[in-house]
Amino acid sequence: MSPRYPLPAARHPIAERLLADGDAVREAIERFGSPLHLVFPQVMAENAAGLAAVLERHGVPYNIFYAHKVNASHTLLGRAAAAGLGADVTSEAELSRALAAGFPPDRIEATGPKSRAFIERIAALGVTANADDLWELDRLAAAARAGSTVPVLLRLSGFASPVVPPSRFGIDLADADAALEAVRRAPGLDLRGVAFHLDTADPAARVDALTESMAVVAAAHRKGLRPSVIDIGGGFRQRFVEDPEPFQRYARALAAAAPGELAWPGHDLGVPAAHKYGNHRPATEVLERFLTAEIERRPVAEVLRECLLTLWIEPGKALVDHAGITVAEVLYRKRAAGRDLVVLDLSRNQITPADQEVLLDPVLVDGRGDPLEEGVFLAGRLCLESDLVSRRKVFLDAEPASGDVLAFVNTAAYQMDLSASAAGGHPPPRKIAAILDGDRFTFAADTSDDDHGS
Amino acid sequence: MRYDSVLDMIGDTPLLRLDPAGHGVPEAEIFLKLESANPFGSVKDRVAWALLRDHIDGIVADEQVVLEASSGNTAKALQIIASMHGVGFRAFTNRVRVREVREMLSLLGADVTEMPGLSECPDPTAPNDVFGVIGDLMEREPGRYHHTSQYTNEDNLRAHYEETGREIYRDAGPVDLLVGGLGTTGSTRGAATYLRERNPDTAVVGVVAAEGDFIPGIRSAAEMWEVGLFEPGFYDAIAAVDSADAITASLELARRHGVLAGPTTGAAYAAARERLLSGPGGPVTAVVIACDRMEPYLSYYRHRRPDLFGAARSATQDAAPSVAPEQMEAWSAAGEHVVVVDVRTALAFQAGHIPGAINLRDDLLEQVMEAGTPFSEASRVVFVCPTGDRSARFAARAAATGCRAYNLEGGVLSWRDSGRPLAGM
């Protein structure tokens, strides 16, 4: 028997409970079909409360904006509204959904590159514009009526610190003065503050970006503007595993493996990034590390209070961490190319974003029996050789048979709909909300039928 | 005992048995290896001398300049040894974060190049780090410099193997547990290697600062995992200790055992006790490396535990005379001289302050005011902070010395929110 390299996923108690409740999963599949995305709004509320508790414990004035792009679910968006969060939207469609979910315009922030039409709606509604470029500021200035106060954040980039990763987004620090000038001259705009977003959990990088951003806050004061917000974006990470050891062991084995040994022939899995599927630290810890990091020998939280700035954060992944699972039925098992395959009624792009390999093992619902000795590959249902749900050998913890249900854990962040296609006439899996009510689950459709797949 | 050179006083440090009534771990013998008793005050005296001893004659003859990456104790010891021999020394470090350490280095005449960055302990594997700068320097002028290279030099390990480890074994016999802070990892690895040759079961615990926290001279947990510097297999455990526990433990060492040791020693002592208390119990011999003294870290203690320095006394706070922004403006308009003292950090001050204010951050102002009130009696002095709570203390103290001092009601926040202008720098 060759060595096994299982990658057990951390499971939230709600997911754990559902995965052990075969009848409930069957009921969901009978009512809504397979494959199926299930979201857990209760988990999202818990995540939001966790982040808020950290900010409150450190006495930082704050606002949390839910980065809706992470999951198109209406249920999750609605839950964010009910939890008192703001919404971070990236398109007109997301803006409409946020309004429909009950967010008032002053609790909505628009981020990312924006079309003219989007900018006009932002200006008309008075939604906060997180400006990605000087072009957007000019369009905003033109769209905002004199006398209105459309709130604007300048998304900054081009930081000098070598630990801040470069970004394609935002206004280069060299252009910050021109951006401030554009806001100052526009009679309908109000500079709310400055923003950045870093794709790293490194507190030192955020500290450096914060320090450099303060020069822009100072420049704004010199121009008579009144910034009151520092927006540090998201990037707080998901906690995929309880223990990083199996991941590290797998990564070492992968590096040492012969071609085709742990990966499907022709596919190189590369060096897996430990900060993603190897991460066992919760987002609250990433946030806390930032707030307790030091600037001028003083914790960031205190410096923010001293700077009279309200901290805005835009978590997406961190808010929906563990807030969803995806289930698919096993069609059949087969042997091909000298390897064991488990064929699912699912396509690769419906479970993973941007063709990334999911480095967590799915779980057999109501799984019984011994762990599978040999690893298997999970195959999708499209007519593409590349439609393998797993291009890596997966070591399942129970024996799958035709008709069994395989569950992918912690899929609510980007995995459900960032890349999902309807190729081959297979619509993207339906999405439903699963609510734990006492000791049983109730299910409700997440989307209206004319908005299928979102 | 008579010595003819201070360098002869390096090493052979005392091993102090802690009174069990004081440490409270049943059946355990806990010893402190008092490296703080070295003549320049730290375990690094051994390292510095071990790195230079065999080379110093050549360095003197060739008039070389000694280079090292160090943020504190190593730099101090190397500087002293270099100046005793009349040769130059340059230290490179990311940042000297503790005031007394910085001041001591300049007092001794050290040429310190600070390169603002991440870590207290440099990372030899990182690009653009101090090691790159040292390498460039040596390449530009071959033969001009001598790089002692404490992170990679085997002499560092050897000193602790041949001296520290041997001394511990001589004085304590077989050791079950050795605990020390992790910087270069030289002291724990060197000493433990010797001790394990005598007792293969010697457990070794390396101590780091909790993630996101800072303890001078040792790495943080995050750095430990990210830096490929140490051999994880060598240690039985890596213990992460937060600065609050390190400080508490060092105070306990001072107050109960009379050992004035710094926060790193506190961290190691805390980790040792925790491991012993959670272990199986039974007779055990543990040695904790006390790497340096407490005094160079007074500002560190003051910053983290202002309560120990009397900062909690606020009896006079209510008596602080306060002033509303309108009144302050009226004084200025009437031609009175008003000094506005903003006690926030420089960053906050630069980002936006009351026009005309000066910046004296609270912890520095605290020190200044211990020596007296630095303001003219002819001026009105208005203290401001974010919300008016912290500045009230200074207003009260200054007023008590006869100064015309006031606290700005509501601080900079109400100033801003009332629509008044802020100046940025």
Image: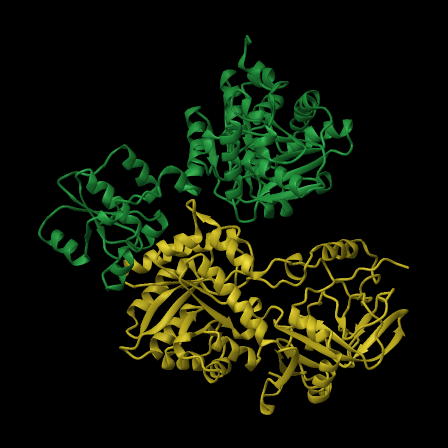
Chain colours: A yellow, B green
**Can residue B264 be seen?**
yes
Number of numbered discs: 0
Where does the image place residue B38, in percent across and percent down from the top left? 55, 21
Locate residue A286: give its quadrant.
bottom right
B96 relative position to A402: left or right: left
Locate residue B307: give its quadrant.
top left
Where does the image place residue B258, in percent across and percent down from the top left? 51, 27
- Seen from the viewer's position, the closer of residues A157 and B405 is B405
Q: Is residue A197 above or below residue A120?
A: above
Residue under the point 54% across and 11% down = B5
Q: Is residue B168 above or below residue B339?
A: above
- Seen from the viewer's position, the closer of residues B217 and A206 is B217
Where does the image place residue A239, in percent across and percent down from the top left? 63, 62
Locate residue B37: give its quadrant.
top right
Quadrant position of the N terminus of chain A in the picture: bottom right
Q: State the residue lying farthest toward the bottom.
A: A450
Residue under the point 86% across and 77% down = A333
Where does the image place residue A188, in percent across and percent down from the top left? 30, 75
- Seen from the viewer's position, the closer of residues A243 and B160 is A243
**Can residue B149 be seen?**
no
Residue under the point 33% across and 44% down = B362
A235 relative position to A121: left or right: right
A318 relative position to B233: left or right: left
Quadrant position of the C terminus of chain A in the picture: bottom right
